[in-house]
Image (tube, rainbow, N blue to C red):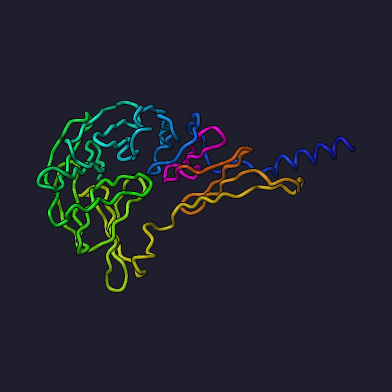
Amino acid sequence: MPALALLAFALLAWSTTPRTSDLEGQWEAAGLRGEVLGGRALVGSGSAVAVDLVTGTRITLGSVTSGTPAVGAGRLLVLGQDRLDGAGLDGRSRWTWTGPPAHALALVAAGPSVTVVQACGGTPGGCRLIGVDGNGREAWQTPQPTATGTSAPVVGADGNLPTVGVLPTPDGTLVLVDPASSRVVLRPESRATVGPDGRLTLRAASSGGCALTMFETLDRSRTSTTSEPCASAPTAEQPIRVASVRSRVWWWPFGKGRPTLEVGGRHTGRVVSGEPLRALRVDDEGLTVLDGATVRRYTWADDA
């Protein structure tokens, strides 16, 4: 009887132990110490290595330590004083573009095949926009609209480049730039933010509420209106939330519990580990985490 009781207790303990649930493992890759850029790539601190958080591809780009890195349209981009280095996060392409002499460079946007760079300087002083293609060659060049002066482009704070370029003007009007064609479109006074995967959102006051226009490309956008002020208006219904907690079990009240990530919102799930956990990316296809020294990608079981 004591042996049966012990076995029953062990089975009960096993069945109630917190574990990963409602997720399906997709891939895993060796992790690294670094920061996430644009929600898309984990870039090593002081190293030349990056891991794509969607596919797990690991790439090396020697200039990562000598410039400012950014991510856009599936590319890792590193802007130096006078040049731009690019590498596809799928590991299939790599190129270098050299800017015009005596010009200050800034990244503007990244479309599927063209990266837009702002180059300011020269005589007379001014700025121009240059499109750089997937081979590091100039695809187009155009003067920056004079209405924007020498204003800096709007980009994500985490190195996330928009799919549509945004240049503000002093009166609040925005100049939008299409990376593919260099086409320029004026938009009324709005506040621009860059969201996941470079999606551009414009917020403009409308009848006591807020009109939200979200761009995938300059020609593909959708507008919705909310009764909330623009400062608090959400960009999506029922977002995906990830919370870091500790899981404990009733039969072992000691210790701090196991590191756990709880997911709620449009998708639900839970990752439990014996190692420290860090959420790196969350989207409608799945969740990527740093689990100790390993990067792991999961897909949602509720989509199966």
Secondary structure mostly seen in magenta is strand
Work out whether residue 120 or residue 260 is closer to the camera in this orientation and state it.
120
Left/right placement of residue 158 relative to residue 13 reads left
Residue 108 percent across, percent down from the top left: 24, 45
Left/right placement of residue 62 relative to residue 265 reads left
Work out whether residue 162 or residue 63 is closer to the camera in this orientation and state it.
63
Relative to 109, residue 135 above or below:
above
Point out the residue furthest to the bottom here: 208
Residue 231 percent across, percent down from the top left: 36, 65
Residue 144 percent across, percent down from the top left: 14, 49
Residue 41 percent across, percent down from the top left: 40, 37
Q: Quadrant of residue 21?
A: top right
Work out whether residue 105 or residue 162 is closer to the camera in this orientation and state it.
105
Name the quadrant of the N terminus. top right
Q: Quadrant of residue 111?
A: top left
Q: How many marks?
A: 0
Q: Residue at x 41, y 28 (%)?
A: 58
Q: Is residue 57 visible?
A: no
Q: Residue at x 30, y 39 (%)?
A: 73
Does the magenta segment cover residue 189? Answer: no
Q: Residue at x 18, y 38 (%)?
A: 102
Q: Quadrant of residue 252?
A: top right
Work out whether residue 115 or residue 101 is closer to the camera in this orientation and state it.
101
Q: Is residue 295 visible?
A: yes
Magenta segment boundaries in residue numbering: 281-304
Does the magenta segment cover residue 289? Answer: yes
Q: Residue at x 13, y 52 (%)?
A: 145
